[in-house]
Image (tube, rainbow, N blue to C red):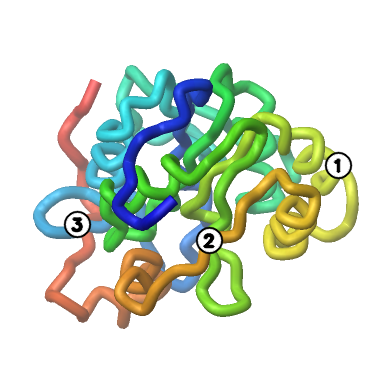
Amino acid sequence: MQRGALAFNPRMTLSAVLLAGGESHRMGVEKATIIFQGVPLWQRQISLLRELQPQEIFISARSESPWRPADTELALDETPSRGPLSGLTRVLERMQASHLVVLAVDMPFMKSMHLRLLCSLAGESCGVLPMIGERAEPLAAVYPREARKDFSAALLGNQFSLQPLCRNLARAGKLRVFQISEEEKEFYRSLNEPNDLTIGGFGLVRNSLPEFR
């Protein structure tokens, strides 16, 4: 399928998850509350996911947040948290749809059209793993429900990185590798430390946020 083809597989149903469970040690403030183009990151990213019209949206986090919209489902990491592996395992175990589209809260340059492209490339029992060169981008990807056993097994082991797990899923045919073009690399840029906020004049918000419930 060519880039730009947006027809979803008719057998495919979609759940979505916003990954917002990072500890933000380097940033020094909860990433979800960073103001990007006039709105908090959590609001922007949820809006992107809503454009895909998933049947449910999860918020993956370590604890409840005052900003979480009431029509989303909270998926708390079990302790001890193993980062995104814990969050994705939890959601894959609870989701009702055939596929899960994943988006990290700190990827504000992602576009809904690109997420739709990833979803359109998914097949029956097979998701989509974006790759930039040799590195996988597992925090903006599509996973099939069948991957939950692999995630659960990884959580019981001693290797919690998503990189080897996703490569194994690709070898098993549960993920389709999709090479990202030079123009698309910008979509995957994340905000990790305060210096990243100087690009484009972004700012931080530390006070209370509007109620979205």
**Residue 66 location (% of width, % of height):** 33, 32
C-alpha distance separating marks 2 and 1 = 25 Å
Tell me the quarter of the image containing the C terminus.
Answer: top left
- Nearest to the eye among marks 3 and 2: give it: 2
Give the residue number, with chain letter if any, for mark 3: 35
Question: Of 46 and 38, which appears nearest the observer?
Answer: 46
Callout 1: few (<14), some (14-19), or many (20+) C-alpha neighbours within 10 Å?
few
Specify the amino acid type for callout 3.
Ile
C-alpha distance separating marks 1 and 3 = 37 Å
Question: Of 178 and 192, which appears nearest the observer?
Answer: 178
Specify the amino acid type for callout 1.
Ala
Residue at figure coordinates x 45%, y 33% from the top left = 16
Residue at figure coordinates x 40%, y 32% from the top left = 8
C-alpha distance separating marks 3 and 2 = 31 Å
How many marks the image carries: the answer is 3
**Please, what secondary structure does the residue beneath circle 3 have?**
strand
Q: Residue furthest front?
A: 1
Left or right, 145 with reference to 190:
right
**Residue 11 location (% of width, % of height):** 52, 21
Residue at figure coordinates x 37%, y 48% from the top left = 117
